[in-house]
Amino acid sequence: MTEPSPFGLLLRSLRVGHNLTLEALAAQSGVSVRTIGDLERGASASPQRRTVDALADGLGLDAADQHAFLRAARARPRAALAPDGPGAISPHRVFDFSGRDSEIDEALEILRGPRASDTQRPALIISGAPGIGKTTVAIEILERDRSSGRPAVFLGLDGFSSSPLSALQVMTAMLRQLPGAEQKPPADLGEARARWRAAVDIAPVTVLLDNVANEAQIRPILSICAGDVVVVTSRRSLAGLEGVRRLRLGPLRREESIAFLHRLIPQAASGEDALDEVAGLCDDIPLALRVVGNRIASRPAWTVDDLLGRMRTSEDRLRLLVAGDLAVEAAISLSYDELDPRTAALFRWISLIDGRTFGAHLAAAAVRSSDLAEVESRLDDLTDLGMLEARGGDRYRLHDLMRLFGRSKLRASVGPDEIARRGDHIRSWLLGTLERAGAWYEPQREPTALGRTGRGFASAEAAAAWIRTEAEHWWPAYTEAAEVGEDETVCDVADALHWYSDIWMTWGNWHRFYSLAASAAESLGDPAKEAAQLGYVAWAEIVEVGDREKAVVTARAALAAAMRAGDVAQQGWAHYYIGWASWTLDRLVEADAAAVAAIDAFTDAQETTGSENAQLLSSLIKSKRGQFLESIEEAEAALARVRSAATADSVTGVITQYAACLELIDAYSAVGRHEDAMRIGEQGLALARALKDDTRVLLMMRRHIRVLIQAGEGEAAIAEADEALRLLGPGSREAFIFARVRREVSLIGTPESPGAATASA
């Protein structure tokens, strides 16, 4: 007699629970009475998807119940456990196993290490993403641990079944694999424990429990097997298990991936660059690498480049990662089908997020949810199932193959118009958040006010951290906004980042950033905005690009736009940039005239910050002319005015004070006033540290170390050089300079005259 399947039992339970006869459900669903009856009796065990959907509609199931209903329909029928026989056949050890040496060494250290007590040995839990090679690694670990001669007991627990094995069924199957064990199933776990311990205490074994569904399935097993060598694999982290050791498998290291491909593809004797690209397109996932290797190896006429050309088209990549019964997409589907509807929807929508990592706030924006706690919980579920990689803090990584899978599911669930609207929403959220972050550094903005879209920040530090961490997301969003003509947004965001860009000068994209804003302002026909953005472009050409000739030209264009707008403050900034660029080019007459014009314009506009910066430019020009005493007087006066102002502690005030200290330390050093130079250097370092700007810290350190050497403070110079080296790390040009200064001062002591060490600094 045919036994009802789990789906048949569920279908009958739901039908009866809704007080429906077979005929009534047939009328409501459009599925025939005979088909429904066959499904309930188990005569038909594999219903088609459209039949399942029709029955779910006829029963009026909600989204969660529909998900459970579909899972039950997809479940493979489980054969009854045989009354005798071995119970399971262990997968074979792969002959071409490659890599994972560090992970296997770690695992062997755990398995061979001391027990927690005379009777307790921690089980090893191996978890990881679909296709990461958990079972293969587990078998390799046990094979390398065979020096003890223990036989292995292997059992696959079918973790994705809707009706996984119970703990008693697991123990029954394990007992059948013991030599000489009785074949009669134990009545309960107590009897199973007694029989297991009686057998393995005499003849120890190692146990591999593969593809575990959840903690409850094996918690009693681990208790029964305490003291035995037990290895468990699961896509889930099984975080609820206590007293275990864990090994989380990630992608292979790139050199391991290339070595693996070499072993799989005999004809790939050369072409390291091609194999490197293949490995990258496979996310260094062992299953994907094996599929690619097998596809090429099974076609002797093929080369790596033949398949590589097809794989570069990202939309086709998952379709190509199939070789025989191996398929990456099928492996991911097993985990995807485990998700509840809301978590599955989150997974699909976050596939729209590009970049290496993303945060929970951005994920919430992608799914248009205001419940951050719920989103974080669902992200944790995806991480637990191996579909996301946790990167620390609230950062996550969605690997490319997972992203491609998610996008294919997204396209199957919603239309292109909805996907485009959601992409627009994500872009708007990113740029709105960027404006709110920049507002903490822009004097004319209220940082705690709510923005049109996006999130806010509790502090300038939190805002700065977001700007730098999320640049891989907001920068593409900004360039896309410029491409689609969102000119007001582009200009507003660029203006909000104006002063923060002066703190993060090392980003490397400011020239492009402000050039896009200048073009947007021109498109708007707003000369005042155009003047401001062209001024920022000139700043980037001076400090980032290093093209001072071009900066003069750009600043003159800014001046022309400011004059068309009648904006006196922007005229002052344009003159300032002309003077600054001219000073770097040693065109001191032109620089002096521009500085004077800037001071006059700023005075008329009552622009205090601009006026103080123009005064400092004037003092720089005097220093370059050798008028150091006049330069010191002018810079000290400007510094005193900024310090006495109400805005002294603002970002603009601190940056201006730092600029004054930078000029003063050089001027004092030039006239031999080393005590004053050291004092100013210490103040400049404190200001740079307040800005959390390592670039400014190191710039001031170079000058301060030189002054310390000149003043005979060799030990202090060495200590500061050591601090600079810690900031820089090894390998950079700056690190080489500081290391050389430190070495020279250590060798020669503090010279009577500056000598070589002073020149080096």
Image (cartoon, grey):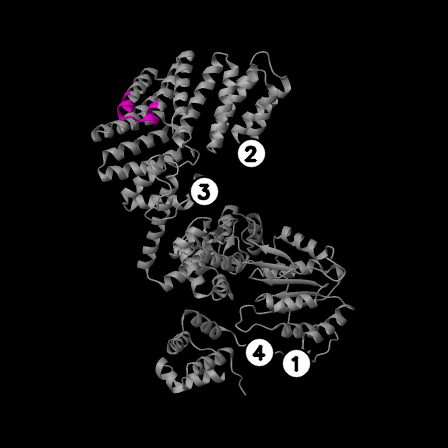
Mark 2: few/some/many CA within 10 Å (<14, 14-19, 20+) = few
Residue 293 location, x and y as percent? 53, 57
Work out how far the residue at label 4 is from the one at label 1, CA to CA, in angstroms: 12 Å
Work out how far the residue at label 1 is from the one at label 2, CA to CA, in angstroms: 66 Å
User: Considering only order in the chain, which callout, 3 or 1, is on the residue closer to the N terminus?
Assistant: 1
Q: Report the side of 459 relative to 533 (left or right).
A: right
Q: Amino acid at mark 1?
A: Pro
Residue 357 colored in magenta in the image: no
User: Considering only order in the chain, which callout, 4 or 3, is on the residue closer to the N terminus?
Assistant: 4
Mark 1 = which residue?
83
Q: Is residue 561 above or below residue 425?
A: above
- The label number, if any, that marks residue 729 in the structure image: 2
Work out how far the residue at label 1 is from the one at label 3, CA to CA, in angstroms: 64 Å
Work out how far the residue at label 2 is from the one at label 4, CA to CA, in angstroms: 61 Å
Work out how far the residue at label 2 is from the one at label 3, CA to CA, in angstroms: 25 Å
The stretch of residues the image draws in magenta is: 600-611
Q: Secondary structure at mark 4?
A: loop
Work out how far the residue at label 3 is from the one at label 4, CA to CA, in angstroms: 57 Å
Q: Secondary structure at mark 3?
A: helix
C-beta proximity under 8 Å, tags 1 and 2:
no
Q: Amino acid at mark 2?
A: Gly
* In this rendering, the label closer to the viewer, 1 or 3: 3
